[in-house]
Image (cartoon, grey):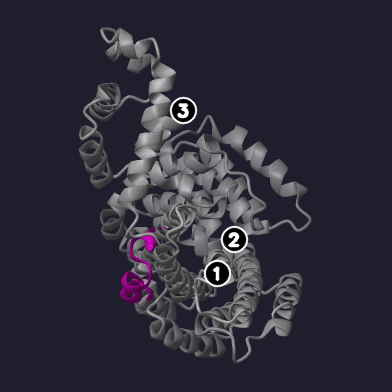
């Protein structure tokens, strides 16, 4: 699939309507309109199908690649105009283009008016690198004596902007490093993880914001501190710094970039609570996340919100209800997954698969699993618990699907992988071994019940440390075994546990 088809596949209905309207106004370019109508209406995704529908349009077929290139550029221009009001970056880029035109035309007073607007937006949104570009034009006007401003004032303004850029860049680097630690750690408090987190935190100490630093950057500093304490499960300090940041965020009209930082911090806090088995606190924090996210990020929080909803179902047992609520998000994932990081895609697909498994929708669970293991082949330097999970969970899912002949092959692959690890987890090895045994006996006889009873007796005794508990937060194999030896489903088991 080339760039044109990929771009069209990402378009929403409102974007398609806008593009149709805009291109229909260009009466002279009938070729682009014809191409657009065919691709939209026939859902074309390759050149072979497109040529089949254009067999009578020789004027287009003879120059198809160029026509597609023109259409691609036209769609991009339409999208830029469509999102101009909702995107600060697009708006600032448009203002810079306007300034360049007016400046070269010698309309310097008009240029100054646009410059001031650009500076104002840049400061309000914490986009200091963009502010620097506008200040460069303003300095040119001062040097040309168009503005009655001392040169020293504009130089001080430039120096202040450079300082803010330095703080902003350093905070972003540290923030990203801490967020990677959340994925790498997943609730673990191993010594090497703590040491790495502390080394990241030490980078923050020399760049504590001073009195001249804008409140937006101070809020970002507080959110970094909050993330640090969340990683150490210090919930009191975490809440303290988040509340400080939230006051400053609201004072500044919630710039979109800061809203993202706040939302990710709250998500990280929820995920740590979940990993540490603090279920009541997790449900309360998730409710807070869902109540505040619309003001902060709107639709951009969908992947995080979806993950929290899936985690909540793993506590409350309301699997079918959550699946119904997330149906639009599951459909959207297929077209928007390229916008997510590998880590986010991995987490989303695994949680979606396990949610379907718990709801006994095994075929749908398998479809989500193959998104990770086979279709996209997402390869990550992921945490050991998640990597091992895909092997063990895959075995059990294939067992429920009745793929008994395939399980020995998967078992050998899983065993080879698990044996290579420096620290072998007996829980995973035993679970894999028992799954192999189950695949070799008649599922309608008593033999499988005997194996399940052995599992229910032995597996709980192998939960000896934090790693095993962390593994169970993702896939509760103990509860799955209980469903085979009792007359309860996993939802009933989870609800009983929550109410106990």
Gap between marks 1 and 3 measured at Cα: 40 Å
Depth check, front residue: 370 or 224: 224
Residue 293 in sight here: yes
Q: Which residue lies furthest to the right in this view?
A: 422
Q: Residue furthest front?
A: 145
Depth check, front residue: 380 or 464: 380
Q: Is residue 395 magenta?
A: no
Residue of label 2: 458
Mark 2 vs 1, N-terminal side = 1
Residue 456: where, in percent of width, then height?
A: 52, 60
Gap between marks 2 and 1 measured at Cα: 69 Å
Residue at disc 3, secondary structure: loop
Please name the predominant secondary structure of the magenta segment in the image. Answer: helix
State the mark number for residue 416: none
Mark 2 vs 3, N-terminal side = 3
The answer to whether the residue labelled 2 contacts the one labelled 1, judged by CB atoms less than 8 Å apart, is: no
Closer to the camera: disc 2 or disc 3? Answer: 3
Quadrant where the C terminus sits is bottom left
- Vertical relation: 487 (above or below) 80: below
Residue of label 1: 135
Residue of label 3: 2
Residue at disc 2, secondary structure: helix
- Vertical relation: 477 (above or below) 221: above
Closer to the camera: disc 2 or disc 1? Answer: 1
Q: Which range of residues does the magenta coloring cover?
A: 289-303
Residue drawn 30% across the image and 59% down it = 322
């Amino acid at each position: 699939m080339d760039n044109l088809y990929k771009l069209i596949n990402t378009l929403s209905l409102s974007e398609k309507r806008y593009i149709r309207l805009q291109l229909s106004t260009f009466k002279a370019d009938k070729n682009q309109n014809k191409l657009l109508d065919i691709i939209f209406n026939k859902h074309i995704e390759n050149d072979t199908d497109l040529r089949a529908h254009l067999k009578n349009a020789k004027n287009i077929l003879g120059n198809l690649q160029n026509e597609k290139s023109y259409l691609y550029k036209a769609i991009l221009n339409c999208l830029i105009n469509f999102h101009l009001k909702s995107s600060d970056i697009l708006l600032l880029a448009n203002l810079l283009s306007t300034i360049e035109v007016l400046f070269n035309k010698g309309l310097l007073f008009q240029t100054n008016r646009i410059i001031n607007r650009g500076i104002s937006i840049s400061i309000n949104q914490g986009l200091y690198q963009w502010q620097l570009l506008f200040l460069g034009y303003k300095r040119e006007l001062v040097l040309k004596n168009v503005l009655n401003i001392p040169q020293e004032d504009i130089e001080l303004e430039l120096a202040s902007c450079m300082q803010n850029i330095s703080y902003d860049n350093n905070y972003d680097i540290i923030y990203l490093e801490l967020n990677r630690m959340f994925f790498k750690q997943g609730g673990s408090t191993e010594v090497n993880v703590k040491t790495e987190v502390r080394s990241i935190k030490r980078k923050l100490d020399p760049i504590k914001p001073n009195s001249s630093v804008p409140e937006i950057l101070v809020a970002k500093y507080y959110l970094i501190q909050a993330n640090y304490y969340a990683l150490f499960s210090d919930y009191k300090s975490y809440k303290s710094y988040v509340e400080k940041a939230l006051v400053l965020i609201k004072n500044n009209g919630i710039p979109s970039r800061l809203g993202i930082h706040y939302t990710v911090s709250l998500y990280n806090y929820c995920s740590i609570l979940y990993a540490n088995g603090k279920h009541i606190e997790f449900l309360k924090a998730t409710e807070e996340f869902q109540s505040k996210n619309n003001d902060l990020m709107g639709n951009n929080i969908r992947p995080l919100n979806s993950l929290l909803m899936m985690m909540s179902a793993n506590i409350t047992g309301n699997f079918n209800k959550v699946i119904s609520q997330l149906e639009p998000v599951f459909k959207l994932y297929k077209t928007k997954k390229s916008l997510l990081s590998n880590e986010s895609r991995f987490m989303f697909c695994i949680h979606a698969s396990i949610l379907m498994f718990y709801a006994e929708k095994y075929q749908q669970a398998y479809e989500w699993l193959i998104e990770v293991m086979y279709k996209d082949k997402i390869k990550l330097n992921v945490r050991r618990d998640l990597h091992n999970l895909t092997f063990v969970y895959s075995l059990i899912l294939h067992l429920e699907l009745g793929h008994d002949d395939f399980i020995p092959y998967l078992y050998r692959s899983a065993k080879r992988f698990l044996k290579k690890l420096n620290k072998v987890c007996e829980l995973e090895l035993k679970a894999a071994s028992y799954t192999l045994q189950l695949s070799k006996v008649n599922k309608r006889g008593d033999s499988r019940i005997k194996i399940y009873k052995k599992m229910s007796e032995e597996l709980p005794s192998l939960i000896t440390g934090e790693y095993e508990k962390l593994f169970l937060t993702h896939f509760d194999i103990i509860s799955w075994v209980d469903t085979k030896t009792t007359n309860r489903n996993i939802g009933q088991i989870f609800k009983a546990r929550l109410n106990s």
